[in-house]
Image: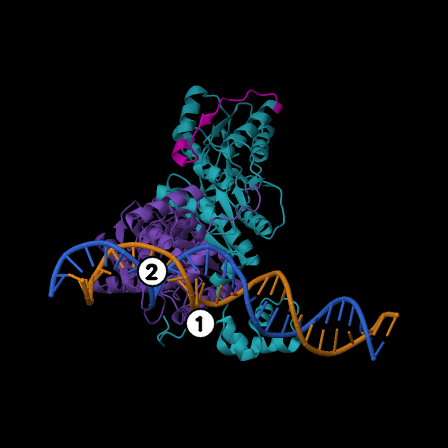
Chain colours: A purple, B cyan, C blue, D orange
Amino acid sequence: MAEDGPRRQPTLDEVAGLAGVSRSVASRALNNAPHVSRAKREAVERAVRQLGYVPNPTARALATRQTGAAALVVSGEDPSIFADPFFAQVIVGASAALEEADLHLMLCLAASDRGRKRVEELFRSKGADGVMLMALREGDPLTRTAEEAAMPVVFGGRPVGPAPRWYVDVDNAGGAREAVEYLVSLGRTRVAALCGRLDTEAGRARYRGYRDAVLAAGLDPFPPQEGDFTESSGAAAMAALLAEHPDVDGVFAANDNMGVGALRTLGGAGRRVPDDVAVVGFDDLALARTSDPPLTTVHQPIQALGREMARMVAALVNGQDRTPLILPTRLVVRASA
Amino acid sequence: MAEDGPRRQPTLDEVAGLAGVSRSVASRALNNAPHVSRAKREAVERAVRQLGYVPNPTARALATRQTGAAALVVSGEDPSIFADPFFAQVIVGASAALEEADLHLMLCLAASDRGRKRVEELFRSKGADGVMLMALREGDPLTRTAEEAAMPVVFGGRPVGPAPRWYVDVDNAGGAREAVEYLVSLGRTRVAALCGRLDTEAGRARYRGYRDAVLAAGLDPFPPQEGDFTESSGAAAMAALLAEHPDVDGVFAANDNMGVGALRTLGGAGRRVPDDVAVVGFDDLALARTSDPPLTTVHQPIQALGREMARMVAALVNGQDRTPLILPTRLVVRASA
DNA sequence: GTCCCAAGTGGGAGCGCTCCCAACGTCGAA
DNA sequence: TTCGACGTTGGGAGCGCTCCCACTTGGGAC
């Protein structure tokens, strides 16, 4: 805090006064708009420097009806889902792209009822120029709110149900297909899937991709062993799978956490990976590199996801239109398959 | 986007008109301030509901000179430092506390020059009511900027040099001391330190704590083996240590990443942990639980750090004062020591 | 009955900016 | 010489809210 008393920030009027021009001219000079003579433009610049003037963003926002900020809303029952390194990557990407568009980033973790209420108010009061919404669970209340919002909303990850007008997603089905095709190419003939939550589009699409690839290879798909994207659920699903189908020789896990869980169960059951059972994950998080054995997995470009979401809102805020975007995945082969 | 044309948001004037009261009364009713009769208060509430009125936060901000938002600024050369799960935890804590104080969270990753410039402008233009600043490196330019800011700035982690007026930190020295005391209690007599960056206060304080504890136990402290908090630097520092002092039997690593790196080097060198060398880390990240062997470490309350920073700015924004806060750490004993 | 005080009320002046628009040259073309 | 045309200029009206302040009322205390 400055301790030298209540010396207000200088205003545009004061700048104009010092520069000997009107407020209008000063404003135009500041936003380097046309219709300002070279001389006055320089006079304004001098005055700005001399006074240490910084425009008041709030006043500007009120006049232009633009806040200069985009919000990233992460919806979920539990605040700890945000602790997933996934979101940190999204933020890094989004932050960089927003910076280029000169938009600030507001972060809303809508976990509690109160949090959701605040987000709703943000939507209704136009507290941001645009929103990037990550609400993956089927029936998430914010999905509805988003539809009636008076601002562009870009979904991060396509939600379950009808496709929203704007979203960025990863090619979940394609990635899963590629993973399973790889297992098949290794000669595996009894390939099962450890699913993620089937109330998310990602969970469904990855199972769909698995199923398509298995059928295309002329094999029989296994029924979904559902988990919830956590390591322990992966371990449990693997145990259940082993009990029902002891002869399984290939496993596609819906994400790396579950893949690592499966690895743990397999190790405990005395199965060798990849000799007895080959395992492929999805995400390519850091833990896929450090697991034992290192996990073959489908890499998804998470930073790019954040970046493209941000670019999309930025474009929409500037009045341009955009169409949904699907980002490609790529298989990263390590030791587990 | 609403498709039903340019129907503006209703304003307070319209609410007042419908309720048959003046704008002033409507405003007071909305902010449930005194001096409003019960009848009119209810009339206003009715009008608000009927019109679907939501106050315009920008206009309010302009009038009150309060933005209703606090910024979390993460400074660093490289945007990827933010990918550290540490920050996700800080955010979860800060977000929850800010929600209670009814403040929005702005997130600024100041990695590029442009990013830093934007943060500076945020400071100078009072684009937020308060700032939580994480700028740990010595000589970070934002540290200076923060000093002349016209708003409260709470440091997350005490910076190197003179203590700022407001900060929240973890008891780094105390935690390190406890870790080393534990190693000593195990009968280790040649205890070395793998330091983190010594241009951060955390790095220095942890080494200080190590040194104090070693001296207090009547042993000889080792000179600092400096790393930079990464796993590979921990591995390298451990290798250097082993080369200089093959008889080391206890290691205090400045954080879990470095501790895991040390584990790796020790394994490669054929030393058994904890039999030959006992290792203690610092942070208690997820990887401390999953390393081999699981890492004994000093737990630091990261979410609480975020929460307390947020509470502190919220209090300061509301005109209350606060003093710096040091959060306690606690030793978590696992297999590595 | 008078007086005073407190609660209730609404008018109006901002907050600091943008942007429309009328007014003003100045200059080349008719 | 006259007349648009066009680049400049500044006045003024907002943007939607808060808050100060002057004003009205009703109900004790005397």
> Label 2: chain?
A
The residue indicated by pointer 1 is: B9
Residue A313: mark: 2
Tell me, yes or no, whether dots 1 and 2 are on the same chain.
no
Q: Residues within 10 Å of mark 1 (few under 14, many from 20)?
A: some
Residue A63: mark: none
> Label 1: chain?
B
Could you say where residue A335 lies in the image, as x and y percent from the top left?
Answer: 30, 45
Examine the rendering and report whether any part of residue A235 can be seen: no
Residue at image coords 40%, 42%: A49
Residue at image coords 31%, 68%: A165
Is residue A253 part of the magenta span, yes or no?
no
In the rendered view, tell whether residue B278 sits above or below residue A300: above
Give the residue type at disc 2. Val
In the rendered view, tell whether residue B324 sits above or below residue A80: above
In depth, the one of B294 and B244 nearer the eye is B244
Q: Residues within 10 Å of mark 2 (few under 14, many from 20)?
A: many
Looking at the rendering, the stretch of residues picked out in magenta corresponds to: B216-233
Could you say where residue B310 lies in the image, as x and y percent from the top left?
Answer: 55, 50
Q: Is residue A218 left or right of residue B120?
A: left
Give the residue type at disc 1. Gln
